[in-house]
């Protein structure tokens, strides 16, 4: 009923807002959820549409002048290799783009994401490092180029973006499971890359081919789109609907999450007076690098009417979310504190 031509899973309006071929999660859909984003509400960013791939004939080819033992692996072979589990966020570089316009008065072109182009899942698969070592990667290898099997994007060919060999050999996963189940079609079935901390485009879905080269590689996805963006900056979101109604005079337990591709979030503060004063939020539970930090704060609304709540986090690199963010030509990396509008009503 809610299916579109580009995304397979249902996109009920209480969980998603759609933008052409992509769909963002509504943050109130995270209220009451556990640490991970349930797969039914995980955002989808497709350049074209979700392909249907037969795992019985699918293979992952590894080749190029940077490996001495090129090869191709089947789904069953991959699933029989040593596996790792990783709790990690995937976030689109354009997450929050809408706020360049709505909050700073300078709209940026592109998908007008709110803050819902992020999710944290439990991924399981084979470390890319294992596959590269098994392919006898050369010490002279420089770049690794994963390519997706989805339809070519405009005249640019298949979606593909080079990854420097250092990152490829560090913490990248060739994932076949998401939240304990085989990857669903929209999130890359049978196999996708998960590149912790990096912009979402690095995590190529529907992986079919990995080239390893002894020279730097260039594709439209590192020269034109997503140029000069690598690691995601620090951001925060409240688990509340936009314009949520909050009753006057009663203590409210507000929850949210903060995250950064640069490392752990070390501090979260909330302002109820437009950034004049800030209160520390509290957190307990998992505090993982590459995922997010769930936090909470209690607040008693003492004034009726419309207002906004601001959240700012600080990450391990020392970066703190500011009230304003310099304009970005492509609208990537909106990391200012977002003004979340609410209305305080008679309880
Ligand atoms: N093959 C392929 N991989 C892709 C994309 C795509 O369109 N095709 N979109 C990328 C972008 S821009 C993002 S943000 C993430 C989104 O992952 P998700 O749809 O599982 O949330 O996938 C990345 N991997
Ligand atoms: Mo993205």
Image (cartoon, rainbow, N blue to C red):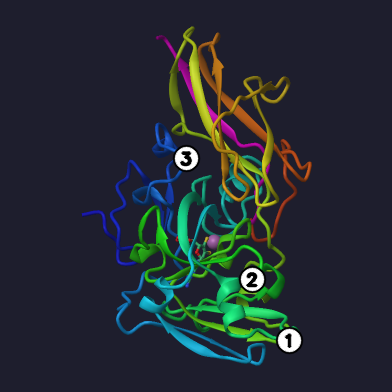
Q: Measuring from the top left, give residue 74's x and y in whole percent.
A: 39, 82
Q: How many marks?
A: 3
- Mark 2 / mark 3, whichever is N-terminal: 3
Q: Quadrant of residue 332?
A: bottom right
Q: Measuring from the top left, give residue 147's x and y in whole percent.
A: 52, 79
Instruction: State if disc 1 and disc 2 touch (CB < 8 Å).
Output: no
The residue depicted at 68 percent of the width and 36 percent of the height is: 313
Question: Marks 2 and 3, how far apart in space?
Answer: 26 Å
In the shown orientation, is residue 12 left or right of residue 140? left
Q: Measuring from the top left, give residue 210's x and y in whole percent.
A: 55, 82
The residue nearer to you, when weighing 89 against 133, is 133
* SS under mark 1: loop
Residue range (magenta)? 332-347
In the shown orientation, is residue 317 left or right of residue 6? right
Residue 202 seen anywhere in this rendered image of the structure: yes
The label on residue 215 is 1
Residue that badge 2 annotates = 168
Q: Is residue 245 above or below residue 123?
A: above
The label on residue 35 is 3
Q: Quadrant of residue 129?
A: bottom right
- Mark 3 / mark 1, whichever is N-terminal: 3
In the shown orientation, is residue 50 left or right of residue 106? left
Q: Residue furthest right?
A: 318
Q: The C terminus appears in which quarter of the rendering? A: top left
* SS under mark 3: loop
Question: Marks 2 and 1, how far apart in space?
Answer: 15 Å
């Amino acid at each position: 009923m809610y299916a579109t031509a580009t995304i397979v899973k249902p996109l009920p309006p209480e969980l998603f807002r759609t933008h052409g071929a992509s769909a963002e999660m509504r943050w109130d859909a995270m209220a009451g959820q556990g640490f991970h984003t349930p797969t039914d509400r995980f955002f989808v960013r497709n350049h074209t549409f979700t392909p249907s791939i037969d795992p019985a004939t699918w293979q992952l080819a590894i080749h190029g002048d940077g490996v001495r033992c090129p090869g191709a692996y089947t789904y069953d072979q991959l699933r029989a290799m040593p596996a790792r589990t990783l709790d990690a966020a995937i976030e689109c570089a354009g997450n929050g783009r809408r706020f360049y316009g709505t909050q700073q008065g300078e709209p940026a072109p592109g998908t007008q994401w709110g803050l819902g182009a992020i999710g944290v899942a439990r991924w399981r698969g084979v470390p890319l490092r294992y596959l590269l070592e098994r392919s006898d990667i050369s010490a002279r290898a420089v770049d690794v180029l994963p390519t997706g099997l989805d339809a070519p994007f405009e005249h640019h060919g298949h979606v593909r973006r080079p990854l420097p060999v250092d990152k490829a050999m560090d913490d990248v996963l060739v994932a076949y499971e998401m939240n304990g189940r085989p990857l669903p079609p929209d999130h890359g079935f049978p196999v996708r890359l998960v590149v912790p901390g990096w912009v979402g485009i690095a995590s190529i879905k529907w992986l079919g081919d990995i080239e390893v080269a002894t020279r730097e590689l260039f594709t439209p996805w590192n020269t034109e789109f997503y140029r000069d963006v690598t690691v995601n900056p620090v951001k925060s979101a409240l688990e509340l609907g936009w314009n949520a109604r909050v009753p006057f005079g009663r203590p409210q337990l507000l929850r949210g999450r903060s995250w950064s591709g640069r490392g752990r979030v070390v501090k979260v503060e909330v302002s109820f007076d437009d950034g004049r004063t800030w209160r520390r939020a509290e957190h307990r539970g998992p505090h993982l690098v590459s995922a997010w930090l769930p936090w909470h704060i209690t607040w008693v609304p003492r004034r009726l009417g419309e207002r906004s709540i601001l959240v700012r986090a600080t990450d391990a690199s020392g970066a703190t979310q500011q009230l304003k963010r310099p304009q970005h030509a492509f609208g990537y990396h909106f990391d200012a504190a977002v003004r979340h509008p609410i209305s305080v009503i008679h309880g």
